[in-house]
Image: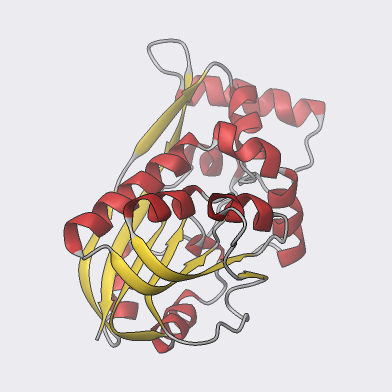
Amino acid sequence: METMERIVTRFTRALDSYDRHADAQQQICRRLIGLLARHTGMHFCRALEIGCGTGNLTRLLKENCVIDEWCLNDLCEGCRAKASAPFGLQPPPFIAGDAETAVFLGSFDLIASASAFQWMKDPAGFLEKLAGMMVPGGVLLLSTFAPGNLSEIHSLTGKELSYPPAARFEEWLSDDFHLLHICEEEIIRTFDTPLDVLRHLKYTGVTATGDGIWTRGRQEAFCRDYIRHFSTPANSVKLTYRPLYLLAVKK
């Protein structure tokens, strides 16, 4: 697991470029809103968003739900202004820091998170913490990533995060939640060259390539192998995201 300092530094550097390049993550946020609309009401008294980033899911929640009181969280203090922008002159409380150790006061009937859960050191313990913060009947809406996410990068570098399978989430949630929906999806992005893949990962903060130190020889070998193994018939190269979506209700 990477140090928290490295994660903060990388995502802070990517804040200005993230929204222009995170189209897969934006698709994931839209899928989450659709999931919420199909399975629950859209009026919540208190909502907490974990890992709000630049506010992609925040904006969609604001546009599609009635939420009386908000609380936003992200590891990066630099996300405060971007995520709070939709609220104009009355931004909600923003708690910067590691959600696993941060203190969130009060109870919530919606806790949402998009593409952040994979960074948690103790996912089972964190889900238990969230359960303790929710009212009975409260909704947990989140996306993370499943095994096989960014498989092209893993196969060439040997580096990847730990992605628990859906069955593990079902086990972790069983004591405190009724699981209404869980599924995986495959999102394949294409790029002109392997260098464009590396730029995409850099601009979204998801390096996924180890220590980030690239010699000329290492980069040339990476590009050569990427083209050999992951080219498409249209002479581009592919990158595979495997988001996992879940919606559960607190018992």
Most distant residue in the top direction: 234
x%, y% of residue 49?
48, 66
Which residue is located at x 66 percent, y 58 percent? 80
Q: Which of 114 and 228 lies nearest the eye of the viewer?
A: 114
The quadrant where residue 121 appears = bottom right
Please determine whether, in this image, residue 119 is positioned above or below residue 151. Answer: below
- The answer to whether residue 104 is left or right of residue 220 is left
Please determine whether, in this image, residue 29 is positioned above or below residue 195. Answer: below
Please determine whether, in this image, residue 19 is positioned above or below residue 62. Answer: above
Q: Is residue 147 visible?
A: no
- The answer to whether residue 175 is left or right of residue 48 is left
The quadrant of the rendering that contains the C terminus is bottom left
Q: Which of 4 and 105 lies nearest the eye of the viewer?
A: 105
The colour mode here is secondary structure
Q: Which of 155 and 189 lies nearest the eye of the viewer?
A: 189
Number of numbered labels in the structure image: 0
Which residue is located at x 47 percent, y 35 percent? 23
Which residue is located at x 44 percent, y 47 percent? 149
Q: Is residue 133 visible?
A: yes
x%, y% of residue 137?
25, 81
x%, y% of residue 208?
61, 46
The quadrant where residue 37 appears = bottom left
Which residue is located at x 59 percent, y 56 percent? 84
x%, y% of residue 66?
34, 62
Most distant residue in the front direction: 89
The quadrant of the rendering that contains the N terminus is bottom right
